[in-house]
Amino acid sequence: MLGGVTSVVHGLGAMRNRLGGAHGQGKKPVRPAPRHAQLAVNLAGTAALFVIETWLAKSEAGTL
């Protein structure tokens, strides 16, 4: 399962590099649909929440 989370995080970075404006758009810019933005936001939020909840669980258990 954690391998899947890792893949999601890497995929978000790749999507940001490909669709974001920071690296230039080239001759044929790609215009993401609103559903792509919604997917990226929801995936990032889910991954962040997982990391926070894992940290809290380890903190409460005294294993940090």
Image (tube, rainbow, N blue to C red):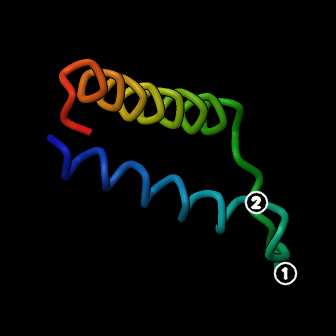
The image shows a total of numbered marks equal to 2
Q: Callout 1: 10 Å neighbours few (<14), some, many (20+)?
A: few
Front-lying residue, 33 or 60: 60
Q: Of the two numbered discs 1 and 2 on the same chain, state the one appearing first in sequence.
A: 2
**Residue 20, image x, y percentages:** 76, 59
Q: Residue at x 77, y 52 (%)?
A: 31
Q: Secondary structure at mark 1?
A: loop
In the depicted view, which residue is nearer to us: 56 or 22? 56
Q: Residue at x 23, y 47 (%)?
A: 4
Q: Image point 58% across, 58% down: which residue?
A: 15
Q: Calculate the distance from the C-alpha at mark 1 to the C-alpha at mark 2.
A: 14 Å
Residue 25 image offset from top left, x and y in percent: 83, 73
Q: Which mark is residue 27?
A: 1
Q: Camera-side residue: 30 or 47?
A: 47
Looking at the rendered structure, the kind of residue marked 2 is: Gly
Quarter of the image where one finds residue 51: top left
- Mark 2 closeness class: few <14, some 14–19, many ≥20 residues within 10 Å: some
Which of the 4 quarters of the picture holds residue 13? bottom right
* Quarter occupied by the N terminus: top left
Q: Is residue 34 above or below residue 20?
A: above
Residue located farthest toward the bottom when viewing the structure as drawn: 27
Q: Quadrant of residue 56?
A: top left
Q: Point out which mark residue 20 bears.
A: 2
Rendered location of residue 27, percent (x, y): 84, 81
Q: Is residue 32 left or right of residue 44?
A: right
Q: Amino acid at mark 1?
A: Lys
